[in-house]
Structures are given as C-alpha cells and as structure tokens.
Image (cartoon, helix red, strand yellow):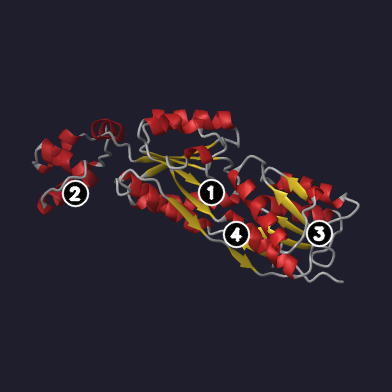
C-alpha cells in the first residue's frame, strides 16, 4: 500500500500541518525539512497531485496546443520551452490538433477539464473562438509563432518579425539580379503566411519589380505541400529564376521536387529556404536559409508564461518579437545576363 501523509507524520514525529505546509511550498524549519525528505525517501512517498491541486487551485500543468507534432520547427520550440517550465516544477501536456480547428477546440476543452494553469497555443483557428472559454475563466493564454488579430490586447505572444524575414530573403535574391522570384507560402489564412507575403511584396516593390501572380504558390506548411507547389512552378512556360520557400518542411519538399526534375541548385535555379535545422545539413548541405531562433522562441514563451502565472505582467498583454538571420550558403548565385 502506498505511503500516506499520516505515515510521514508517524515516521518524523511531526504534525500533519507541518508536513502539509512543506508539500504546498510553505517554509518549514530546516531540521523539519531534513526529517520530511528522509521519510519521503525511506517510505517512497508520492504526493497526491490531484488532491493538492484541488486544495491549492493550481495543477502545476501547462497545456500546449500545436498544429503538427511531426513538424521539426515546432518540436524544437516545445523542447526548449519544456526545459524551463520543468525547472520551475511545471509539467506540460502537448496536444496535436493536426491543423484542424475542431480538434483544436476539443483540445482546449480537454485541457480546461484537466485544470491546467495556463495555455500556450500555436493557433490553427484564425478567429480565436477556441480561446474564449479560457480567457473568460482568467486562465493565462500565450500565442506562439502566430498572432490572432481579433485577440490583440487580450493575449500575450512570442513571434518573429515575419515581414523582415521575407524581405531579407527576397532582397538577397534581387541584389543578385533576380527579378522572376517564386514564392512558396503556407496556408492562406494564417498570420505567418500573410506577413511573409507582405515582406516578399515589399522587397519586390523596393527593387522596382512588379509581382507576378503565378509565381506565388500556396502549400500547407508540409513537405508534400512544398513539393506540389514547386512542381506547379516548374510547369510554367516562363519559370522563375529563384525561389523563396517559407518553412522547413516545404523547403525539404522543394529540394526533392527539384531533384526529381533534374533542376540543379544554384546552376539552374537559386533557392533560399527557411529554418536552420540539423536535418538540412545531412540531406541538403550548405543551403542559404532564413534562420528562425526557435530555441529562443521556446525560452521566451516559457519565461513569459511564468511571468503571467506569477502575476508579474500585472494583467497586461505583451508581444515579444524576435528577429531572424540570413545564413549564407551556396544555393544562390548571381543571375547571368
């Protein structure tokens, strides 16, 4: 039979009030702390977290809802975020909604029933309707990577400067003489997609280049989406001379499509991809990439959530915007005149 707090009391000779105070984070005398911890070890005592959460109204659990657990960019964010939260004695429940808004709403309800202390969401539903219940309940909500315009001023967020990221890439290509620049974007309604499109258009305008509508293709932030988008671009009578692809998975799909069609990079086509992850170095070495600070996104998200939970944000909402960097590789070259 599992040990109870009464067993600890008998083992230590201390009252239940002192032992309860210790497990609920209160301050006890040093000699009592030593006695309690020795008894816990001897009796293999495991605290009843459910009972404790009912008493303290805190579960010490953070719910995380993401669109695709198979996405390497997302998992790297979760890993760095979880490292910090665990150090502060918070557990994490991750829900993968498969980029489905109904699943996302169900995940929110599931986590609320588990009495999570906070919610971190890389949102699929662009309306924000799925977050009404936790916001109404006063549960801290933090968005990562994607803003929801209708929730500005109501939630905090950690994002990157997507407009600048796309502008960086396209400016690099225009500086090399490219004017026919293809763009592979994610799902049309997402914040990141629209921001990266804006950056692309801004850079073309700055270079005095009129956008070509058929060069702008939409995938769904998956490898297959990138593959199909590039297949369609390669069918054009007047192909682009360069491509900018706006996430990791679609960049992988792009490179596979180019290989399957015998297109050489950069001899036949210059390419700038997205996200500097280890897998690229193994499969497609030395690509020119826009690098997102995914580990910093995770760390900033964890620390901001901790601040929200400790009321250090004083009820305010804060948006943390991080910058990207262009990592030079050999996948681009000047356009021959």
Q: CA distance from mark 4 to mark 3?
A: 20 Å
**Left or right: where does residue 155 sit relative to residue 124?**
left
- Quick check: 86 above or below 168? above
Q: Secondary structure at mark 4?
A: helix
Name the secondary structure under disc 3: loop
Secondary structure under tag 1 reads: loop
Q: Mark 2: which secondary structure?
A: helix
First in sequence, mark 1 or 2: give its number: 2
Q: Residue at x 17, y 38 (%)?
A: 20
Q: Which residue is mark 3?
A: 180
Image coords of residue 278 (percent x, y): 61, 61
Q: Between residue 2 and residue 272, name the one nearer to us.
A: 272
Q: Does label 4 or label 3 sit earlier along the sequence?
A: 4
Quarter of the view holding residue 329? bottom right
| Residue 39 drawn at (x, y percent) | 18, 45
Q: Find disc 4 in the rendering and name its residue.
A: 164
Residue 304 visible? The answer is: yes
**Which of the marked residues, 2 or 3, is nearer the chain's N terminus?**
2
Q: What crowding class fits label 4: few (fewer than 14 Cα within 10 Å), some (14-19), or many (20 or more)?
A: many
Q: Residue beneath label 2, please?
A: 38
Q: Residues within 10 Å of mark 2 (few under 14, many from 20)?
A: some
List x then y, in percent, for residue 248. Answer: 65, 53
Where's the N terminus, which quadrant?
A: top left
| Badge nearest the viewer, 1 or 2 | 1
Give the label, 2 or 3, closer to the camera: 3
When asked about the image quadrant of residue 19, the answer is: top left
Numbered circles on residues, count: 4
């Amino acid at each position: 039979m599992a040990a109870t707090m009464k067993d600890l009391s008998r083992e230590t000779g201390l009252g239940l009030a002192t032992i309860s105070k210790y497990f609920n984070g209160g301050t006890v005398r040093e000699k009592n702390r030593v006695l309690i911890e020795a008894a816990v070890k001897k009796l293999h005592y495991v605290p009843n977290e459910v009972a404790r959460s009912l008493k303290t109204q805190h579960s010490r659990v953070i719910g995380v809802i993401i669109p695709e657990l198979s996405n390497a960019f997302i998992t790297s964010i979760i890993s760095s975020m979880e490292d910090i939260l665990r150090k502060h004695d918070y557990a994490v429940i991750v829900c993968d909604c498969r980029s489905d808004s109904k699943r996302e709403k169900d995940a929110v309800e599931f986590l609320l029933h588990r009495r999570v202390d906070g919610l971190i969401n890389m949102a699929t539903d662009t309306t924000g309707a799925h977050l009404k219940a936790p916001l109404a309940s006063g549960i801290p909500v933090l968005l990562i990577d994607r803003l929801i315009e209708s929730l500005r001023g109501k939630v905090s967020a950690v994002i990157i400067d997507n407009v600048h990221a796309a502008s960086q890439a396209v400016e690099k290509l225009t500086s090399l003489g490219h004017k026919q620049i293809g763009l592979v974007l994610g799902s049309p309604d997402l914040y990141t997609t629209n921001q990266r499109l804006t950056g692309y258009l801004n850079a073309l305008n700055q270079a005095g280049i009129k956008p070509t509508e058929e060069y702008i293709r939409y995938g769904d932030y998956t490898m297959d989406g990138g593959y199909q988008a590039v297949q369609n671009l390669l069918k054009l009578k007047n192909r682009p001379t360069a491509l900018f692809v706006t996430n990791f998975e679609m960049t992988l799909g792009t490179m596979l499509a180019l290989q399957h069609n015998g297109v050489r990079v950069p001899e036949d086509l210059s390419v700038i991809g997205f996200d500097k992850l280890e897998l690229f170095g193994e499969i497609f070495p030395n690509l020119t990439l826009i690098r997102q600070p995914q580990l910093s996104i995770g760390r900033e998200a964890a620390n901001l959530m901790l601040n929200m939970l400790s009321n250090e944000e004083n009820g305010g909402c804060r948006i943390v915007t991080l910058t990207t960097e262009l990592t030079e590789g050999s996948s681009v070259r000047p356009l021959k005149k």
